[in-house]
């Protein structure tokens, strides 16, 4: 529930940034000029609106998982919201990549130019953090079924030290059964 509420707070911040720009403190007057067509910052406001929508979906998914804890779980797959949230997270990859790229292409040598670290941070989120997070949620969905452990069979070679500790009912794909 706390993570869902945090997503809603991020949604509000992103939407405020989209509608008013980088205005701080929040009670200051909005800067509405970038909503006019020739302004190079317009594309960033559109990306912030999409990011705000992404945070809304993420928060709703977290609250839905809390509200319906067994929804969509099968013997071999986890909660349906894990699947959906992995895709919601993955939607952040093109958003952050576009933010980073556009900061170097559109804003460079303009009065709106950003520090180089902002673009690097966007690329790092797009190419490292968000893919790991999305992969983790997807893997959790694929492996968190309702069957008792072990749910999966061994794949690949079995090393003697590890196989000797395997349960008696453990069987691998190639037919090897511990003795």
Image (cartoon, grey):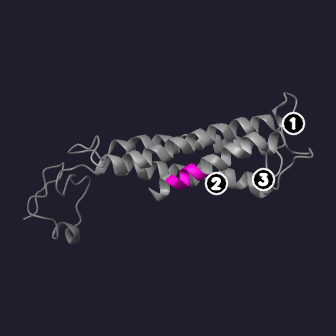
Q: Residue at x 47, y 40 (%)?
A: 87
Residues at circles 2 and 1 in contact by the CB criterion of under 8 Å: no
Label 3 crowd bin: few (<14), some (14–19), many (20+), radius 10 Å:
few
Q: Earlier in the sequence, mark 1 or mark 3?
A: 3
| 2 vs 1, front mark | 1
Report the span colored magenta.
Answer: 5-9
| Residue 27 badge | 3
| 1 vs 3, front mark | 3
Image coordinates for residue 7, horizontal then vertical, percent: 54, 51
> From the image, which quarter does the C terminus lie in?
bottom left
Residues at circles 1 and 3 in contact by the CB criterion of under 8 Å: no
> Whole-Å distance between the Cαs marked 1 and 3?
18 Å
Look at the magenta stretch and give its main secondary structure: helix
> Whole-Å distance between the Cαs marked 3 and 2?
31 Å
Q: Earlier in the sequence, mark 2 or mark 1?
A: 1
> From the image, which quarter does the N terminus lie in?
bottom left
Label 2 crowd bin: few (<14), some (14–19), many (20+), radius 10 Å:
some
Image coordinates for residue 32, horizontal then vertical, percent: 83, 38
Label 1 crowd bin: few (<14), some (14–19), many (20+), radius 10 Å:
few
Closer-to-camera residue (130/174): 130
Please give left or right for residue 90 compared with residue 140 in the image.
right
What residue is disc 2 on?
124
What residue is disc 1 on?
33
Q: Residue at x 50, y 45 (%)?
A: 58
Element type where label 2 sits in the image:
helix
Element type where label 3 sits in the image:
loop
In the displayed structure, 125 sits above or below 72; it is below
Toward the front, the furthest residue is 27
Residues at circles 3 and 2 in contact by the CB criterion of under 8 Å: no
Q: Residue at x 39, y 45 (%)?
A: 64
């Amino acid at each position: 529930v706390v993570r869902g509420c945090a997503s809603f707070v991020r949604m509000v911040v992103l939407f405020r940034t989209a509608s008013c720009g980088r205005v701080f403190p929040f009670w200051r007057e909005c800067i509405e000029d970038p909503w006019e067509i020739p302004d190079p910052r317009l594309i960033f406001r559109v990306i912030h609106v999409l990011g705000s929508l992404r945070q809304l979906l993420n928060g709703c998914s977290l609250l839905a998982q809390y509200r319906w804890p067994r929804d969509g779980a099968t013997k071999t797959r986890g909660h349906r919201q894990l699947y959906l949230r992995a895709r919601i997270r993955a939607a952040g990859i093109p958003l952050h990549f576009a933010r980073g790229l556009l900061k170097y292409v559109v804003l460079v040598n303009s009065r709106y130019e950003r520090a180089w670290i902002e673009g690097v941070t966007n690329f790092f989120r797009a190419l490292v953090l968000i893919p790991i997070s999305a992969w983790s949620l997807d893997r959790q969905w694929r492996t968190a079924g309702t069957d008792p452990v072990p749910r999966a069979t061994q794949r690949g070679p079995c090393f003697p030290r590890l196989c000797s500790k395997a349960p008696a009912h453990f069987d691998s794909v190639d037919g090897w059964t511990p003795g």
